[in-house]
Image (tube, coloured by chain):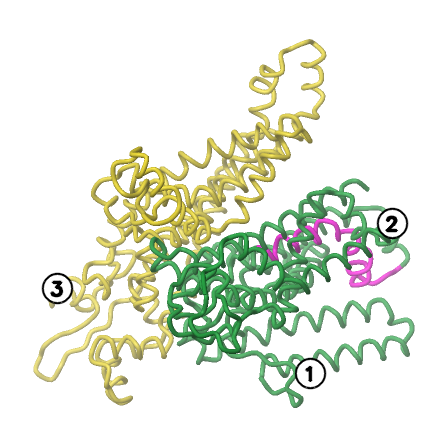
Chain colours: A yellow, B green
Amino acid sequence: MLLFLLRRIGLMLVTALCLTFVVFALTNMPAKLETLAKTQAGSRMSDAEVTSWLERNGYAEPMLVRYGEWLGVMPGWVRVDADGSVTGRCVALRGTDDAAGERCGLLQGDWGFSTRFRAEVSDVIAARLGATGLLMMWVLIVMVPMALIVGVLAGMREGSRTDRTLSTFAIASTATPEYVSGVLFIALLASSTVGISPILAEWGWIDGRVLFQGNARSAIEDITLSNFTLPVLTIALYGMGYVARITRASMTEVMTQQYIRTARLKGVAFSKIVLRHALRNALIAPFTVIMLQIPWLLNGVVISEVLFSYPGFGWTLYEAAVNNDIELLLAASVVAVVVVLVTQLISDIGYVYLNPRIRIS
Amino acid sequence: MDPLNWFEILARMAQQFLPVWVALVVTYALSIRFKRRLGLYGKLFDSTVGMIGFGIVLFWLFTALFADLIVTHDALSQVSGMRNEPPGSALRDPRDLYPYYLLGGDSLARDVFSRMVMGAREVLRIAPFAAMISFMIGITLGLPAGYFGGKLDTGLTFLANLVLAFPVILLFFLLVAPEIQETIIPSVMAGILFLVPILFVTILLNARFFTQPAKRNLYVGGVLLVGVWAYAGLVFDADPVGLWSMSPNLLNVFVAVVFVNAPTVFRIVRGITLDIKSRDYVAAAQTRGEGPWYIMLWEILPNARGPLIVDFCLRIGYTTILLGTLGFFGLGVSPESPDWGSTINAGRRLLTVYPHPALVPAIALMSLVLGLNLLADGLREESLKD
């Protein structure tokens, strides 16, 4: 087991290194650096000025060297001007001249400076991750029980009318990407002119003009039912269908097993069979899928946070990409890649623990 | 003129879709008549779910085909006074134009209905094609990885996992950026990705017909001719006739979508191959002395077709969702393009006041993906019955 874990973690590190290098290379393309120079130092620069700006700010070194600097395995670049003033990667990051020539990168905890938010990348990311963590927590609280209930109810009696209805619902939910369901929800529930909000307001059932708010920016300070429901529902709905279908498939398979038939022949009540005998065995497969679903939710998080302008991690990633904020984008992708790899690892380990038939050699 | 009520709007829309209805009825009548002779396709008509799904998919397919007959206005032209008008509004000064905006006008006074119809063409021009290329790549790499195993398998699986560990949105932001478009990266990736289908078909035919050189030379030569022609047009934009061409924008989108999809297909094909290669008929072919590529492509692949066809339908749907995502973030498409993702994106700014410009493409996209998923479900059910 330990050897397996070590191998997996080693593989994970190699994957993370490869992926961050790809992101680094793509964000540091010559054309992107030119855009960066122009946004930082004036848009009417000549080509020669751009080149000299890039040279002065340490962007002219080879890609691998700069990747090493960013990682923190190579000393940061240093330049001593004719008048004796020292500039360099670490000087700018740490704010003292003494830091020149030291290593300052990811490994030292120096994540860089965000040009979009004018703040330390680590602070920006930490704050936004907290906001997204809250969102994800609610998404999982809504999604997982709903998906499991739908899946178990559908798979309990294969081919019944309940099964048909719930399966169609699950398929419909996987066919509704976040940007579609979000738009539908806003039009139906959060508009003061159309949908059901004006009707409810007329009847006097709701106090405000709309049932739910289509903008979740206020949820950063204070989460309420009215401003947080729609983003959570939007993300949960798309992921739910898939988990429900896996649960259904797993449940139908378990229900055909011999021990279920034995239990039925013994005269055990159907509800008891489902709860005592079938459920536990049927939940092994969904567990893996739920873990693997978390990276998929990341997509939904970006779309939903942009749509409802909730300033979380996804929104930050979007802003960083749109504004060509290289350091922030790199940090965001490191976080995203780590999330993906860690959930993969957890799902593998969890699968082994839940299913005693699988042994790791 | 008075605006139309909802009943009139629906009736007029049904009338515009007339070519689609005719084509649908003809297809269904012929298919049901001859369903016993049509194999898996015919069996589809035994399952209600499959039939509904297939109907929705066909509806959009015919809409894309007959889009020029269906649209009431030009998808890009603006008519004064029609900004954000609700569905069924009459044009102020129709002259020789269609007198109504059936589903209202968008924020630039264009007809929402016509844009939705033209959007179907945009989506269906890319999604199935991208899914097909992803499948050919996944098959070409997944079969040998599963069949030979060893170092090749380890290497390819690592690469596939690498791509799969990349958050899709991040990849899109990085790959489908205007700065990347000007570099050589999309062309190089397209060069590699489009080479695989040609290789696939060539090997496929060669493995089967190499004992009959005359036939082999004819088939492989024909494939290579068409392949190199299309390849030159798509990758280098150097098609002398001009039949095959792709704008750099579209090429970039295409490459990104294929790149995201291919590793998943690879994993599926590899898994099925691992399962099938221990079967008796594979052992029999090996004993007969068949080459590895013949066994992979003519013994294993046909027996893996069930799950692959099902996944193909799902993948077209997923590709549609991905294209919508790209449009939603305004990546890789021109701003006035009528594709559904960017129309939703354009409509969401005024969503709470004028929902119709965003709702119409949203529902269209949802129904197409739903149709594909139902179709896949029906196919799975029917193929399991054998």
Q: Secondary structure at mark 2?
A: helix
Mark 1 vs mark 3, CA separation in Å: 59 Å
Q: Which residues are magenta?
A: B289-317
Specify whether residue B287 is painted magenta.
no
The residue tagged 2 is B36
Mark 2 vs mark 1, CA separation in Å: 39 Å
- Choose between B270 and A189: the one closer to the eye: A189
Q: Quadrant of residue A266?
A: top right
Q: Residue A239 location in percent, x, y?
A: 49, 43
Return the mark for residue B229.
1
Return the mark for residue A95.
3
The correct choice, above or below, for B97 with respect to B358 in the image is below
Q: Quadrant of residue A81?
A: bottom left
Give the label, 1 or 3, closer to the camera.
Answer: 1
Chain letter of mark 1 equals B
**Residue type pointed to by label 3:** Gly
Return the mark for residue A225.
none
Q: Residue B254 location in percent, x, y?
A: 55, 69
**Residue type pointed to by label 2:** Arg
